[in-house]
Image (tube, rainbow, N blue to C red):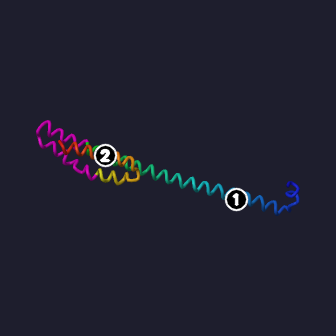
């Protein structure tokens, strides 16, 4: 085998070396591109997750405001506390936005939907 390599002309040796370098370079480029694509997808999923978490935070705040207003009205008998509950009446719309944003995250979405329904049932019963 080594004797065949020695017998090759210098141009063939250089051409073979360049072909090997070209194949190696192409392979590394393809692997790098695939890795970059994977990183971009992961970044997009992370961004989406933080958007959903932000929506959940706003929803939680609205739910706490609504619960506080209803509780204040029940304890004091003063309907002025319902203003806070009315201001948080967009909770259902916020819940729909959260569920829409979390459609990719089905397991979390199902759990969140059950918690929202349980909370809204409790508030409506009061």
- Predominant SS of the magenta segment: helix
Residue at (36% x, 49% y) in the render: 109
Instruction: Give the class, few, some or many, for how many residues have Cα within 10 Å of label 1's Cα (few <14, many ≥20).
Output: few
Image mark for residue 107: none
Residue at (27% x, 53% y) in the render: 93
In this rendering, position of residue 6 left or right of residue 37: right
**Residue 60 figure quarter:** top left
Residue 116 location (% of width, % of height): 28, 46
Image mark for residue 114: 2
According to the image, label 1 marks what residue? Answer: 23
In this orientation, which residue lies closer to the viewer: 56 or 114?
A: 114
Residue at (74% x, 60% y) in the render: 19
Task: Give the distance between the C-alpha atoms of the residues marked 1 and 2, in whole angstroms.
Answer: 55 Å
Q: Secondary structure at mark 1?
A: helix
On screen, residue 55 above or below 13: above
Q: Earlier in the sequence, mark 1 or mark 2?
A: 1
Q: Secondary structure at mark 2?
A: helix
Of tags 1 and 2, the one toward the viewer is 2
- Magenta region: which residues? 64-93
Residue at (57% x, 53% y) in the render: 35
Decide whether residue 2 is among the magenta residues. no
Residue 26 location (% of width, % of height): 66, 59
Circles 1 and 2: CB atoms closer than 8 Å: no
In this rendering, position of residue 28 left or right of residue 19: left
**Residue 21 figure quarter:** bottom right
Decide whether residue 66 is among the magenta residues. yes
Quadrant in which the N terminus appears: bottom right
Q: Residue furthest top?
A: 75
Residue 61 location (% of width, % of height): 28, 43
Quadrant in which the C terminus appears: top left
């Amino acid at each position: 085998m080594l004797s065949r390599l020695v017998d090759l002309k210098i141009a063939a040796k250089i051409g073979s070396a360049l072909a090997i370098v070209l194949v190696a370079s192409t392979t590394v480029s393809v692997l790098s591109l695939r890795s970059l694509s994977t990183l971009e997808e992961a970044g997009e999923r992370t961004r989406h997750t933080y958007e959903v978490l932000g929506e959940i935070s706003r929803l939680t705040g609205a739910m706490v405001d609504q619960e506080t207003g209803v509780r204040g009205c029940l304890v004091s008998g003063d309907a002025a506390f319902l203003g806070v509950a009315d201001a948080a009446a967009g909770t259902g719309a916020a819940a729909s936005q959260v569920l829409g944003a979390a459609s990719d995250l089905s397991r979390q979405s199902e759990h969140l939907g059950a918690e929202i329904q349980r909370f809204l049932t409790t508030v409506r019963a009061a």
